[in-house]
Image (cartoon, rainbow, N blue to C red):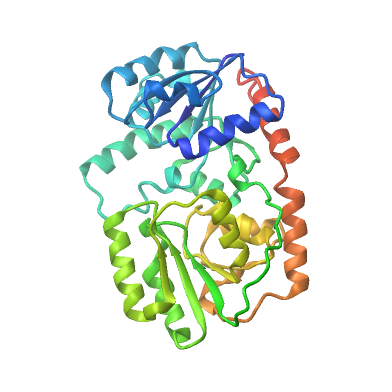
Amino acid sequence: MNTLHIFNDPKFSEDYFEFLIEQGFDLSSHCLFHYRTRARDSQRFPLKSSHSPSFFSLLPNLRLLPLLFKADKIIIHCLAAPALVFYLFLFPSLCRKCYWVIWGKDLYLFHFEKNKRLYHYLFEFFRKRVIFRIPYVVSNNEGDLAYASQWYGLDAHAFPSFSYPSNLFKEPRYLPRLRTDKTLLLIGNSADPSNHHARIFEILKAFSEKNVELVVPLAYGNQTYSKQVIKLGEKIFGRKFRPLLDLIPMDEYLALLERVDIGVFAHERQQAVGTINTLVGFGKKVYLSPVSSVRDQMNALDIVTYDLSAFDLEPIDPEIARHNRNTAKDYFSRSSLASQWREIFKHDPRQMS
């Protein structure tokens, strides 16, 4: 069965295909269409691939159409590309073989846009009709599935999966703790406005005189917004505010997460899941927005997280930390992820579920 993968972000795709090969998947009948990469990037992917430097590159998007018709199965890793949405709208029969891996942002794209322009309404017109027709989705987030049903009338068969290796359980290395009474807080995961940094800072302002340090990752996302966050963070917290402005190697990032005491996230949609899963697996205390679909997901897994509106600096109870760590280790395992994708790949879209 010919399977076409459509990706937007190499930050996830490279690890994804490496994981599939490591787990013994035969990718000889798989091919890839990748946005935001160029033809010279083909060697990064272990399968036949086509590339487009942007969503709006004319010739690459024209090459996508025959790939869609040739495929027996289309796996959409984030439904955000305008040309893809337009093709699926024009040719409804293509939708019948689509599996939408919900990323979160692609679901909330229109509903969380504060400055809607004509383009957004037009794109949403097409998206709404396409999403309604998609028969299969990949997600383990019941909140996102409920929103997809409410907003788009989606009535699809759901394949439960945490989708990508970035969400796998990571074994803590038990690095030696620095001798300090300081409480280390990780604030958000990027310079995307959906992190709602100002909202978090307003809550944490009451603790600004305590012995705390705020580590705020801002290397990835909107740099204009990043400057606003830095200005506000330094104004409220002074030298206790430490922005991370450069991407750091994964080993260094994991070492940082292992030293964190409390993670604080105000996202209202599915975001920062890999970082949150890692903190939970390290036995850290994690605060989430009470309306976050990620919090609903954690509750469903019986993983304890905390309501951001009731923030305090108390350390996590060791028994809760142990419970969270063991639960995460069981669920977010390599064997579970491999099993989830094996189930998706063996499914025949011609046999409606």
* In the depicted structure, whether residue 257 falls above or below residue 20: below
* Residue in the foreground of this view, choosing between 107 and 199: 199
* In the depicted structure, whether residue 88 falls above or below residue 277: above
* In the depicted structure, whether residue 292 falls above or below residue 158: below
Q: Quadrant of residue 327?
A: bottom right
* Residue in the foreground of this view, choosing between 243 and 306: 243
Image quarter in which the N terminus is found = top right
Image quarter in which the C terminus is found = top right
Q: Residue at x 77, y 66 (%)?
A: 322
* Residue in the foreground of this view, choosing between 245 and 311: 245
**Is residue 353 at all visible to an observer of this figure?**
no
Q: Residue at x 38, y 26 (%)?
A: 84
Q: Give the x, y percent position of residue 338.
A: 70, 34
* In the depicted structure, whether residue 21 falls above or below residue 255: above
**Is residue 236 at all visible to an observer of this figure?**
yes
Q: Give the x, y percent position of residue 24.
A: 71, 25
Taking the image as shown, residue 219 lies to the left or right of residue 345, namely: left
Q: Quadrant of residue 27?
A: top right
The number of discs equals 0
Q: Which residue of the protein is positioned furthest toward the left in this rendering?
A: 118
Q: Which residue of the protein is positioned furthest toward the bottom in this rendering?
A: 209
* Residue in the foreground of this view, choosing between 316 and 352: 316
Q: Give the x, y percent position of residue 247.
A: 43, 51
Q: Give the x, y percent position of residue 33.
A: 44, 23
Q: Residue at x 68, y 68 (%)?
A: 176
Q: Residue at x 72, y 40 (%)?
A: 334
